[in-house]
Each structure stands twice: as structure tokens, then as C-alpha cells.
Amino acid sequence: MQFLRAAGRAGGGQVSAGGWRRGRCLSSIRRTAEAESESLRALQTVQDPLLGGTGRQGNIVSDGMVERVKVELQHKRARLDLVLPTAAYTEEDALRAACIEAVRAAVPEVEHVEITGRPCMPRYGARSSRNVSGEKSSLVPPALQHVGAVVAVGSCKGGVGKSTVAVNLAVSLAKK
């Protein structure tokens, strides 16, 4: 501990037992937080390639497609977790390219951008969640807000009465 105290006085900054200078560590944390904010601001300029800016808000952040932004400046990488509108989203590659371009332009220190995308599949009973900007975003489209549950009727064979069963089930449930 004597060495650390002496090194702290000699170096002009305080050194903790782990060897980090307190000021340098705080500035690193601050710069990482700034980089994450800059990345998020840059992602607000990215539009959903499929909708072309005709989504609810016109950008992927406001539309709730960005779930998490994590920047690790010491490793020169960023990680984005995206929520895709469907499992069969056709413009995933274009969306990834636009996100990578936006993050690299906003934070030049980032050399590698890792993007994971998962389809928007709300948990049973979930009506909304919070997106990365803290805003409440609906996971359920407005046209289906009144629907309590979805029941699928299926068969691998045709002509077995799937439509009849589905209609009778819907009528029975509506009466309750």
C-alpha cells in the first residue's frame, strides 16, 4: 500500500489498489456513456428499410426496434440488439448495414459492430415494454390491442374441417 500511495503522489493522481487512476477510470466510463449516447442518436437517423420511414415514428429507435446499445471502447466494438417486426423480416441485411454505417460514423473508435436481431414475440400477456430510449412502446399492433389470446388450428392434411373448428371455437369463446 505504501508503494501505491507514493505512486499516487508522484504521478499527480490518486491510484487505487487495483492500479487504476480514479480520474482516468471515470473519464473512460464517461467516454463510453457518451459513445453509447452518440450511437443511439445516430441510430435515430436509420429508417426501417421495409417501411421506408412510414413506421409509427419513422426511425428504428422511436419504433422500438433498438433494444440495447453497448459500446466497449477498450475493445473497439459495439453491440446492438434489435427487435425485428417479424421472424421472416426480409430487409435484415439492409437494416444491419445501415446500423453499422451509422454507429461507425458516430463513434470512429468503433471498428467492429455486432448486431443481433430477434423477432418481436411478446410474452404471453405482455402488452408493452420499454425500448432503449425509455419510451413505452407497444409490442402489439393497434389493430390487435383488444385481442386477449391467439389460438391456432392446424393440420397437415387438407379437408379435415380446420375452418369449421376455428369458426365454432371463435363463436363459443365470444359467447363467454
Image (tube, grey):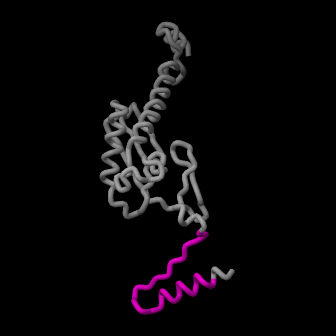
Residue at 38% across, 47% down: 47
Task: Give the position of the C terminus as an image quadrant.
Answer: bottom right
Residue in front for this viewpoint, 83 or 175: 175
Q: Quadrant of residue 140?
A: bottom right
- Where 18 falls versus 144 (above or below)? above
In this view, the residue farthest toward the top is: 10
Residue 90 place in picture, x, y as percent = 33, 60
For the point 61% across and 69% down, which residue is it?
148
- Determine whether, in the image, residue 4 is placed left or right of residue 87: right
Give x and y (percent) for residue 76. 35, 34
Work out whether residue 64 or residue 8 is closer to the camera in this orientation and state it. 64
Q: Which residues are magenta?
A: 147-172
Residue 50's place in the image compared with 98, above or below, is below
Residue 55: in magenta span: no
Q: Is residue 123 left or right of residue 107?
A: right
At 50% from the left and 78% from the top, the residue drawn is: 152
- Quadrant placement of the N terminus: top right
Residue 148 in magenta stretch: yes
Near-viewer residue (132 or 15): 132
Furthest residue toward front? 54
Kindly identify the residue that appears in the image at 40 percent across and 89 percent down: 157
- Whether 25 is drawn above or below 102: the answer is above
The residue sitting at the right extreme is: 176
- Tell me if 128 is positioned left or right of 80 in this view: right
**On the rendered structure, is 85 left or right of 122?**
left
Number of numbered tags placed on the structure image: 0
Quadrant in the rendering for residue 113: top left
Q: Position of residue 111 (x, y in %)?
A: 31, 36
- On screen, residue 3 above or below 132: above
